[in-house]
Image: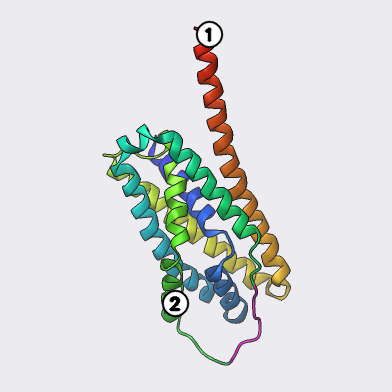
């Protein structure tokens, strides 16, 4: 794996784990609608710090026990695929709401970023999502002693998450008059569908491997 590949994989993971519309996304959208692009970005950056911590714990945890993981890779694929499908179904069925009318209170940029950080860091589902995704990357994850590769992948996650918040804040501030609950619902359906498909592909890959192994046995 090259430096660029590690960063790119982390970048995609960062977007995948950040895109589902949850409390932080709704908070960022609300602030972008009411206060503009920069305020929405600051809210998102608070969540980026939490996601970077979770990604570091997941990737270094996975890398540190590579031998253990490799010996039980089939089980990890099964569990990881199930988790992604469950998360996808849960996100699909979530109905976020946004309040466009402010209550007159003023918040600081750092205060909102801190609120987003604590909102994200107290969500246990995020660490499980990172662990599931990194656990099923197989040869696409860094080796257990490749700390530099792990750092690159974590940096990619942070970059992907930050890019998502920049995109969301820019989009919302430009189309703020059109943002409503129906728009958020469609975003959730897209994110949930992607996670479900990713989980399904894991099972498809596992099934194909089993069929290939069985064919090899019968061939002998």
Give the overall secondary structure of the magenta segment. Answer: loop
Percent position of residue 173, x then y = 63, 72
Secondary element under disc 1, as helix, strand or loop, is helix
Residue matched to label 2: 115
Which residue is outermost to the top?
220
Q: Nearer the viewer, residue 49 or 196?
A: 196
What's the residue at 42%, 68% (across, down)? Answer: 122
For residue 98: magenta? yes
User: Is 127 placed left or right of 173 in the picture?
Assistant: left
- Residue 179 visible in rendering: no
Highlighted range, magenta: 97-103
The earlier-in-sequence mark between 1 and 2 is 2
Q: Residue furthest left?
A: 145
Query: How is colour applied across the structure in the image?
Result: rainbow
> Viewed as shown, does residue 142 lie left or right of 175?
left
Q: Quadrant of the N terminus?
A: top left
Residue 202 drawn above or below residue 26: above
Q: Can residue 23 be seen at all in this image of the molecule?
A: yes
Image coordinates for residue 168, horizontal then vertical, percent: 59, 65
* 3 shown above or below 86: above
For the residues carrying marks 1 and 2, which lies nearer the camera in this image?
A: 1
Dot 2 crowding, Cα within 10 Å, few <14, some 14–19, many 20+: some
11 to the left or right of 189: left
CA–CA distance in space, label 1 to label 2: 60 Å
Q: Is residue 219 magenta?
A: no
CA neighbours of label 1 inside 10 A, class few (<14), some (14 to 19), many (20+): few
Q: Residue at x 66, y 54 (%)?
A: 190
Above/below status of 196 relative to 209: below
Q: Residue 97 at x, y = what percent?
A: 65, 74
| Drawn side of residue 96 relative to residue 124, left or right | right
Name the element at disc 2.
helix
* Residue tagged 1: 219
């Amino acid at each position: 794996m090259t430096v660029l590949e590690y960063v790119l994989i982390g970048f995609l993971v960062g977007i995948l784990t950040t895109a589902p519309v949850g409390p932080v996304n709704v908070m960022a959208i609300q602030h972008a609608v009411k206060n503009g692009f920069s305020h929405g970005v600051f809210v998102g950056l608070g969540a980026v710090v939490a996601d970077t911590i979770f990604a570091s714990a997941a990737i270094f945890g996975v890398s540190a026990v590579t031998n253990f993981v490799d010996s039980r890779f089939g089980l990890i694929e099964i569990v990881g695929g199930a988790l992604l499908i469950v998360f996808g179904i849960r996100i699909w069925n979530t109905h976020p709401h946004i309040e466009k009318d402010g209550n007159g209170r003023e918040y600081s940029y750092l205060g909102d970023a801190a609120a987003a950080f604590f909102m994200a860091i107290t969500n246990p589902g995020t660490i499980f999502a990172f662990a599931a995704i990194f656990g099923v990357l197989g040869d696409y994850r860094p080796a257990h002693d490749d700390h530099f590769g792990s750092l690159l992948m974590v940096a990619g996650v942070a970059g992907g998450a930050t890019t998502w918040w920049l995109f969301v804040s820019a989009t919302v501030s430009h189309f703020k008059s059109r943002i409503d609950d129906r728009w958020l619902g469609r975003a959730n359906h897209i994110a949930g569908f992607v996670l479900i498909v990713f989980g399904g592909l894991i099972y498809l890959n596992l099934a194909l491997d089993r069929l290939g192994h069985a064919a090899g046995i019968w061939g002998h």
